[in-house]
Image (spheres, helix red, strand yellow):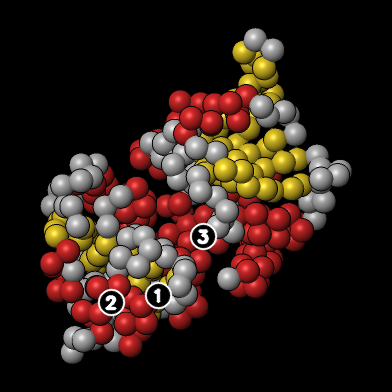
Amino acid sequence: MTNVGHRCAVLGKPIAHSLSPVLHNAAYRALGLDGWFYDKHEVGEPELEGFLESLDDSWAGLSLTMPLKKTIQPYGTPCNTWARELKVANTAVFDWTGTCRNGNTAIPAIRLYNTDVKGIELAFRHSYMERGTQPESERTGGAVIFGNGNTATSALAACTEMPSIGHVTVVARHPDKNAALKPLADKYMGEGSIDIVGMDQAARELDYADVVINTIPGLAADPIAETLASADSLVHGTLLDVVYDPRPTKLMLAWRSHGGTAIGGEEMLLYQAMVQVWLMTGIWDDDPPSHPINQQKVNALEHAMRATLEEAL
């Protein structure tokens, strides 16, 4: 790399599959940030501290994927609602003006953010805008989330941000696995706003769902798709399947064939990355930003990143 004044990267293990460099470097080109470069590094939990200590002040930020979204917590300060609430961060922004020293090593202040929640919320918002529809402004709708891992927790948080959703049903292979889900729903949507059930109830929950989010990785949701495909009933809601390989998934195809609207996981990927770009480059001073947003610049950036992502998939 030559003439790189600002560096960012995504960390995780495994990381070879990540499309984050494609998205972020496209954003830098669209914004005219010639001295910026984004890369990927395979870093597991034992290597994270050493990696952070190896950085110099050319580094502006990091994206964190599995297994580092919780491992990063002791090294920084959560700076938006969902990084604080969920204790999960996928974004680290370095502030070298707050640098301290650990022996001979310079250590920046690290601000932590969760942009996954915003990515899910914006994916649905974009879908509604594309169709010219507007969900109810009162919490009368229902959502279904498949899975109860970390991504499901972010999905639940996103549902609490949707003014139309008043009840969430989580469908999981191990319903008792994630004890944080019920307190989160109770806090932001009220007592009795969540049910957590087994996979044997998956199909029956879909008929009346306004929002469905599948967080089960790989091909594990295919049995749900097969059950839906053989059913006679129609669906009316919007499905986000966070899986984007294969594209479209069997669940998306079954959902569309029964009358619903399906969004691929690339939409979540796009929007969470957009917010990361704003934060890492300093165009946003925080999340949410404290100054007015230039909507024309936002639209241009979204167009450039979306076009590049479509080419990469």
Identify the residue at horizontal 53%, vertical 31% (top origin): 48
Identify the residue at horizontal 18%, vertical 74% (top origin): 203
Q: Is residue 277 above or below residue 23?
A: above
Identify the residue at horizontal 28%, vertical 77% (top origin): 225
For label 1, the residue is 249
| Image quadrant in which you'd find residue 312 | bottom right
Q: Going from the N terminus, do you reach mark 3 or mark 1 first?
A: 1
For label 2, the residue is 225
- Visible in this render: residue 103? yes
Q: Position of residue 298 (x, y in %)?
A: 64, 61
Instruction: Count residues near mark 3 (Cα–Cα under 10 Å), then give few for <14, some for 14-19, many for 20+.
Output: many
Total numbered circles: 3
Q: Secondary structure at mark 3?
A: helix
For label 3, the residue is 269
Q: Nearer the viewer, residue 50 or 80?
A: 50
- Visible in this render: residue 183? no
- Calculate the distance from the C-alpha at mark 1 to the C-alpha at mark 2: 9 Å
Q: Is residue 284 above or below residue 18?
A: above
